[in-house]
Amino acid sequence: MFSRVLIANRGEIALRVIRACKELGIETVAVCSQADEGARYLELADNTVCIGPASSDQSYLNVPSIISAAEVTDVEAIHPGYGFLAESSHFAEICESSNITFIGPSAKTLKTMGDKSEARRVAVENRVPVLPGSESTITGQQEAVEIAHKVGYPVLIKATAGGGGRGIRIAHNDASLVSSMAIAQREAESAFRDASIYIEKFIERSCHVEVQILADQHGNVIHLGDRDCSLQRRHQKLLEETPSPSVSQHQRAELYKAALRLAKAVNYVNAGTVEFLVDKDNGKFYFIEMNTRLQVEHPITEMVSGIDLVKEQLKIASGEQLGYRQKQIILNGVAIECRVYAEDPDNGFRPQPGLISMYHVPGGNGVRIDSHVHQGYEVPPHYDSMIGKLIVHQDTRKEAIACLERALNEYRIGGVKTTIPLHLRILGHSSFLNGDISTTFVESLLNSD
């Protein structure tokens, strides 16, 4: 096992990794920007290094500064968390050339599965169903229009290097396709320095279901069940649950087989998530992408499996074999997670940076809070606006929803508006209570006001 690990991230996920390292007896080095200096969670790290100004480009995305911090503090490995450099093949290559272990898949795997069009090609080669669409990146408007006519509108325009809902647009006709392509390319260039895009058929009544996998360096690959991530706004997730209420046991078994087949095909190592869309009208499922990192929603899988995914990442990266086989994995009960954002849902989800004047977290049996904020914490305007995750775990979905509703009503955050009122609306909706959800659920709920 490593003796010292640097965490190339901030906030809630940095704290999450610090805790896992402490329990494994690993020293931690936390990096921070000038905007995060003095944050209370940094006090729990053994060492802290400021790597640059508030801007992500000059701090959390600044590869030379992070590698310099790693070398100065003599770490053996870097945990990238999620977001920022977590899926950067370039960063993984730099780590490898610096004799620092990147806690994640290889640079080669990151490059293959990080390119969405290349990942799609690999899926096709390995008999994993994909949505009708372009076989590679789109080179021009005419090609895009021809493909859209072939698969039929509406279509989804997606950045090949995308993530976090950026570089994605829906088009319903030729005119909107052309204008949406330009917007998606600008977003992709800004966010990922890669304007490449591809096109897929957009399924209007679909569920977003993903499969969590773990794979070690010795060829062992297992899954830890599925998660339903259909409740999204602007292609960013708001609420996730496991197991998905939208798939049958037969569909679930087929999803697991497809996910494992794809992971083995690319010699995947570490934690990863294979994401699918399930068509609610015909029951078919389609591969959409693989997230080659830890997911924000990993806690719900931890709750039903009893397996600490961050500890597993660290063990796998240090060369250990998985301590169990698939038949030993038992998934118990239902877990649901609400992502709590400092945003105003009634005002276009406008971010709400500012001082948290009051902060009281809920508790009770089966309730977990993953958050780095506290009363007196200043939510910075420079980064993602998620301030915490509320996770509940109960024996049944009905009990989990009741527990989550109670916990949300206990969760008190003053000084900034949050998405908690929206979460309560979702939980009280008859369609959600009946498990009848899709990727357009939140949009429909908001448009019904």
Image (spheres, rainbow, N blue to C red):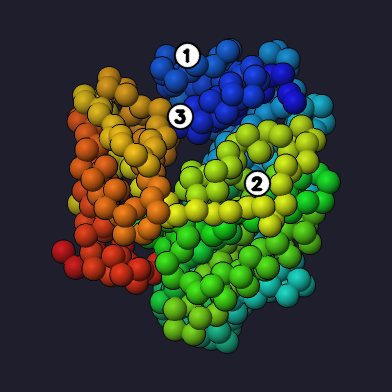
Mark 1, secondary structure of its residue: helix
- Quadrant location of the C terminus in the rendered image: bottom left
Q: Of the numbered discs in the image, which one, if any, rests on residue 11?
A: 3
Residue located beneath label 2 in the image? 271
The picture quadrant where one finds residue 398 is bottom left
In the image, residue 432 sits, relative to residue 36, either above or below, namely below
Question: Is the residue under label 3 in contact with that under label 2 (CB below 8 Å)?
Answer: no
Q: Of the numbered discs in the image, which one, if any, rests on residue 43?
A: 1
Residue drawn at x 61%, y 19% as measured from the top left:
28
What is the distance, in whole Å, between disc 2 and disc 3 at their CAs? 20 Å
Q: Is residue 376 visible?
A: yes
Q: Is residue 298 visible?
A: no
Q: Residue 320 appears at what percent x and percent y?
A: 78, 36
Q: Residue 122 appears at what percent x and percent y?
A: 74, 66
Is 370 positioned to the left or the right of 349 in the image?
right
Camera-near label (2 vs 3) is: 2
The picture quadrant where one finds residue 139 is bottom right
